[in-house]
């Protein structure tokens, strides 16, 4: 029996050896006989294999990272997450052939020999067939990449994804940014025997305040798209550029080059890029260019709309009639009546459209989906010329001009290129001062500015209330206001909780009634009023904080109270 088994064993080896010899003679390499490696895994499938839109760790926690199924529980699988790694997650099951079966079952289709020619696309198995799809996830590390379309991307992956979504080809180019300026300096002196040492400081005659090369334009994009703004400025010495978004609570965050905040990036050439734009990204983005010769501010409006609103029509005349002018003068409706949404409203004092948080109370019509719709409805004339930035333009027929600088309150010289300028362009200082900030004989009041912003004013104040001014009495250099108190947010010295429904009398000190500050008027509009207590009286100074109440501002103040932020500010900033 043993001899029979041995004979069979050697017979099998002889067959294998003969087969190998035959394959060698035919020129087939032995390695082709190697069986495909079987990748053992837990039963079931990953959530994103069931539905491409179903990813694990939707809140970006990305905990319990793994490499293989063996690191997870028996009922779990190691699946891709939104952070670009893998996490252990409960397995899913489908009664579809090829999706469920023994461990290690090979797939019906593979991407081994399937090529995707479109830049930024990759192979994926969809409905049992290999298909090409655009990348939907990129790594989080910044590696700013300048592309042939003139944009700077967060990294190479984002550039490839943009090329795929548009069906085009983008190439990486060298990041170059040239500042041009007319050579108005005198010719160099004759060569001397002894070389002279250049002054490390820029000569005063060789300095020039910042000026724009191109006019800021409003952009409107659909949710999920990428948008960028380039603050194209010149000046000597080279201006430093910062960006900030104008927020309704005044707590703007300043961003400098190579700065990343959420989905907003400022590149190394000071280009502002917003990836995956959302509704709350809409607003006014302000570029500030500064050097020793001056400062310039330019506003870039951005509207973000949903896909079905991309071709939205103007709200200024929904039924062919003109939009009611009186509605444009009403304050923004910021009360909270349900879902909050970023909308635009016309600010008569700024003579421009700004964003605010709309609470769907519909108390007035001063709310719009886009900046353009707001301007069409409420802008009776062009923007005040004196508020526009100095604009050199792209042409090179250089000529000295003057422009009013709203930051310094003075007229300053700049070089005009000869084309594509704006209204803030005067041939002499006298002509500029005659027209700005307002034409002589037509003086208007400037906006009241509190001494500190919202949070700092709250911490410095003796009392903070929400209320409405019901009566106002003017007196020489002072005044009195009766305020119906809706809510007391802070009271350190007056015991306002015992006031009941009685109105609070507030004294206004040092008031110029031609242009009163703070701007307190009799109105049903709820206000946030912050002031001091002097001799038991509630007192407001010209720089006290008085502003329109909004759900966002009140929520911010409640957060300050809950987190005891004022205690921290008092300790580190010496607030009293």
Image (tube, grey):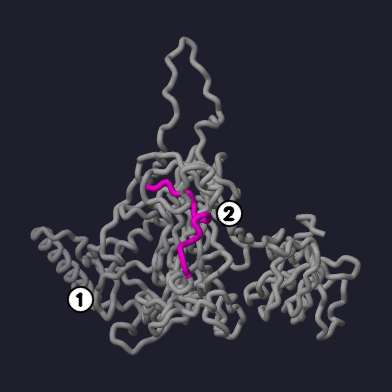
Identify the residue at the far right of this view. 535
Spot occupied by residue 56 in the image (x, y as percentages of width and height): 46, 76
Q: Which residues are magenta?
A: 379-394
Q: Which residue is label 2 attached to? A: 440
Residue found 69% across the figure and 75% down from its top: 527
Spot occupied by residue 249 in the image (x, y as percentages of width and height): 63, 67
Magenta-span inclusion, residue 326 = no
- Which is more N-terminal, label 1 or label 2? 1
Judged from the image, the secondary structure of the residue bearing numbered disc 1 is helix
On-image quarter of the N terminus: bottom left
Q: Please say if the residues under marks 2 and 1 sit with CB atoms less than 8 Å apart.
A: no
Q: Which residue is label 1 attached to? A: 4
Q: Quadrant of residue 448?
A: bottom right
Q: Front-most of 168 and 81?
A: 168
Spot occupied by residue 538 in the image (x, y as percentages of width and height): 83, 70
Q: Is residue 192 left or right of residue 519?
A: left
Chief SS of the magenta region: loop
Q: Callout 2 environment at 10 Å: few (<14), some (14 to 19), or many (20+)?
A: few
Spot occupied by residue 302 in the image (x, y as percentages of width and height): 45, 65
Residue found 25% across the figure and 73% down from its top: 131
| Label 2 – label 1 distance at C-alpha | 121 Å
Q: Callout 1 environment at 10 Å: few (<14), some (14 to 19), or many (20+)?
A: few
Q: Front-most of 344 and 245?
A: 344
């Amino acid at each position: 029996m043993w001899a029979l088994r041995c004979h069979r064993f050697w017979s099998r080896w002889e067959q294998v050896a003969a087969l190998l010899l035959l394959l060698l003679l035919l020129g087939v390499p032995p390695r082709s006989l190697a069986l495909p490696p079987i990748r053992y895994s837990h039963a079931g499938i990953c959530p994103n294999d069931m539905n491409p839109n179903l990813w694990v760790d939707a809140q970006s926690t990305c905990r319990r990272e793994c490499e293989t199924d063996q690191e997870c529980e028996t009922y779990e699988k190691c699946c891709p997450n939104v952070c670009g790694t893998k996490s252990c997650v409960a397995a899913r099951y489908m009664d579809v052939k090829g999706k469920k079966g023994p461990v290690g079952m090979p797939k019906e289709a593979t991407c081994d020999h399937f090529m995707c020619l479109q830049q930024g696309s990759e192979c994926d198995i969809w409905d049992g067939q290999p298909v090409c799809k655009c990348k939907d996830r990129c790594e989080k590390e910044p590696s700013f990449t300048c592309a042939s379309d003139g944009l700077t991307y967060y990294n190479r992956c984002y550039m490839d994804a943009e090329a795929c979504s548009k069906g085009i080809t983008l190439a990486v180019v060298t990041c170059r940014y040239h500042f041009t300026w007319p050579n108005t300096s005198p010719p160099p002196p004759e060569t001397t025997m002894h070389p002279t040492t250049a002054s490390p400081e820029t000569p005063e005659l060789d300095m020039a305040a910042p000026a724009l090369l191109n006019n800021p334009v409003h952009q409107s994009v659909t949710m999920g798209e990428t948008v960028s703004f380039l603050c194209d400025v010149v000046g000597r010495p080279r201006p430093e550029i910062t960006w900030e978004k104008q927020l309704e609570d005044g707590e703007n965050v300043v961003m400098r080059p190579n700065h990343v905040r959420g989905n907003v990036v400022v590149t190394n050439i000071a280009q502002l890029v917003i990836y995956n734009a959302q509704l709350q990204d809409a607003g006014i983005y302000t570029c500030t260019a500064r050097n020793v010769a001056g400062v310039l501010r330019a506003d870039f409006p951005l509207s973000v709309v949903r896909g079905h609103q991309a071709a939205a029509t103007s709200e200024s005349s929904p039924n062919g009639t003109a939009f009611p002018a009186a509605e444009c003068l009403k304050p923004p409706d910021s009360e909270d009546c349900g879902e909050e949404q970023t909308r635009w409203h016309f600010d008569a004092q700024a003579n421009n459209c700004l964003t605010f948080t709309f609470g769907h109370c519909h108390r007035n019509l001063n709310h719009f989906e886009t900046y353009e719709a707001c301007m069409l409805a409420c802008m009776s004339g062009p923007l005040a010329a004196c508020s526009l930035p100095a604009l050199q333009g792209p042409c090179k027929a250089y000529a000295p001009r003057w422009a009013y600088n709203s930051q310094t309150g003075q007229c300053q010289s700049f070089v005009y290129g000869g084309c594509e300028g704006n209204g803030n362009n005067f041939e002499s200082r006298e002509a500029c001062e005659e027209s700005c900030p307002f034409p002589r004989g037509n003086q208007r009041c400037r906006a009241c500015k509190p001494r500190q912003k919202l949070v700092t004013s709250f911490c410095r104040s003796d009392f903070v209330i929400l209320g409405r001014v019901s009566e106002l009495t003017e007196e020489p250099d002072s005044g009195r206001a009766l305020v119906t108190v809706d809510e007391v947010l802070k009271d350190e010295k007056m015991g306002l909780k015992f006031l009941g429904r009685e109105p609070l009398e507030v004294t206004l000190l040092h008031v110029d009634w031609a242009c009163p500050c703070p701007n307190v008027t009799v109105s049903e509009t709820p206000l946030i009023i912050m002031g001091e207590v002097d001799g038991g009286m509630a007192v407001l100074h010209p720089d006290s904080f008085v502003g329109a109440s909004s759900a966002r501002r009140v929520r911010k103040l409640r957060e300050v109270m809950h987190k005891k932020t004022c205690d921290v500010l008092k300790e580190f900033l010496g607030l009293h």
